[in-house]
Image: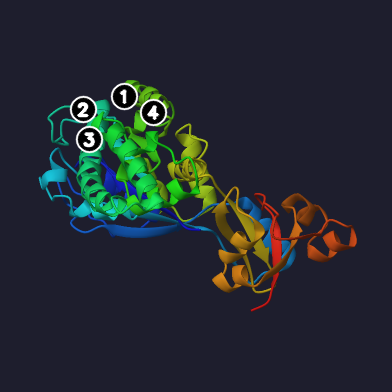
Amino acid sequence: MSFNCGIVGLPNVGKSTLFNALTATAAAQAANFPFCTIEPNVGKVGVPDTRLDKIAKIASSAKIIPAQLEFVDIAGLVKGASKGEGLGNQFLTNIRETDAIIHVLRCFDDGDIIHVDDSVDPIRDAETIETELLLADLESLEKQITNIERKAKGGDKEFKEQHDFMKRVKTALDAGEPARTVPPENPDEERWEKQMGMLTAKPILYICNVNEDDAASGNDYSTKVASMAAEKGASSVVICAEIESQIAQLESTEEKKEFLESLGLVEAGLDRIIKAGYELLNLHNYFTAGPQETRAWTIRKEAKAPEAAGAIHTDFEKGFIKAEVIAFEDYVSNNGEQGAKDNGKMRQEGKDYTVHDGDVILFRFNV
């Protein structure tokens, strides 16, 4: 399973600067004027995981392949975007295709950087974006309900139930509440929710972009955002996009560590965003290891062994026979697969096994 996040926010909040830093590319032009991002930029970064190096060393792997985290930098939205203002709702389509939303909020004062509303207020900015997404959802859902109503009149029970679910979501949207406040109650509703493609159903992570002096402890703006996020059942992370840009230019891990320590920071903003994102989407990693490569695979925390196998290839899931599993700690303490096997630490697991974070797995399958 890939982790795909759409980075949204008003113009000039530091979205593209953050995107460039996170992906260590210059794909997105960061400039001090609205709409400098004309097309959505996509960048993938490797997810840092110290366990990979330990496994690869024991397995004598030729290469290491970390899990991939994908960011989509979406052009700055403005009030009225759902009705075509600014660059319009063409970018709402790009958001619709992501798994989660990273909402960057400006939490710093700087008279040299213009703000579309002429003042800094991250709570107001968050409400502006949420309103535009909500209005876009309402417009989309009203059309879907009209279509389902015709089918429901034919007496089909499933269409009737789907219509009822849609109406529950619409009631929430009409009240100014996002679709995520109406969680699916059964597998059918989960399926219908995906089909509906509601923007406000996506989990959201707020990124407070602060200046360098506030990077370690945040400021009044970020404190207000944290309170707002808690009320919404969301999370927030404090970062400084400019610092992330400087980190991206450093080549060695030691240089990055020293730079962070000089600023009183324990880890880079990217690492904090990844951790928060994994928690947001309920994800974790398992590993495969061998002479050719050691690789991390991202899956849902509740994933059973066949689903985890499917992350490698759909044939692995279809033809799943069993999984030979070694816990990460057992793999390391027993010096690899053979030692774990000799000491009874390799387990044979079937289709009902729930894969744990850090499992080192060899799948047996037949197609």
Marks 3 and 2 sit apart, C-alpha to C-alpha, by 18 Å
Residue furthest front as drawn? 155
On-image quarter of the C terminus: bottom right
Question: Which mark is in front, 3 or 2?
Answer: 3
Marks 2 and 4 sit apart, C-alpha to C-alpha, by 21 Å
Colour logic: rainbow
- The answer to which of marks 2 and 4 sits earlier in the sequence is 2
> Helix, strand, or loop for circle 3?
helix
> Helix, strand, or loop for circle 1?
helix
Q: Position of residue 288 (x, y in %)?
A: 66, 64
Residue furthest left as drawn? 85
Q: Dot 3 corresponds to which residue? A: 131
Q: Dot 2 corresponds to which residue? A: 120
Q: Dot 1 corresponds to which residue? A: 221
**Foreground of the two, 267 or 335:** 335
Whether the residues at callouts 2 and 1 have beta carbons within 8 Å, the answer is yes
**Foreground of the two, 203 or 217:** 203
- Which amino acid is tagged 4? Lys
Q: Position of residue 37 (x, y in %)?
A: 20, 54
Question: Which mark is in front, 2 or 4?
Answer: 4
- Which amino acid is tagged 1? Tyr
> Helix, strand, or loop for circle 4?
helix
- The answer to which of marks 3 and 2 sits earlier in the sequence is 2
State which quadrant residue 26 falls in: bottom left
Q: Is residue 222 above or below residue 142?
A: above
Viewer can see residue 33: no
What residue lies at 31% left-to-right and 24% top-to-bottom? 221
Whether the residues at callouts 2 and 4 have beta carbons within 8 Å, the answer is no
Q: Dot 4 corresponds to which residue? A: 232
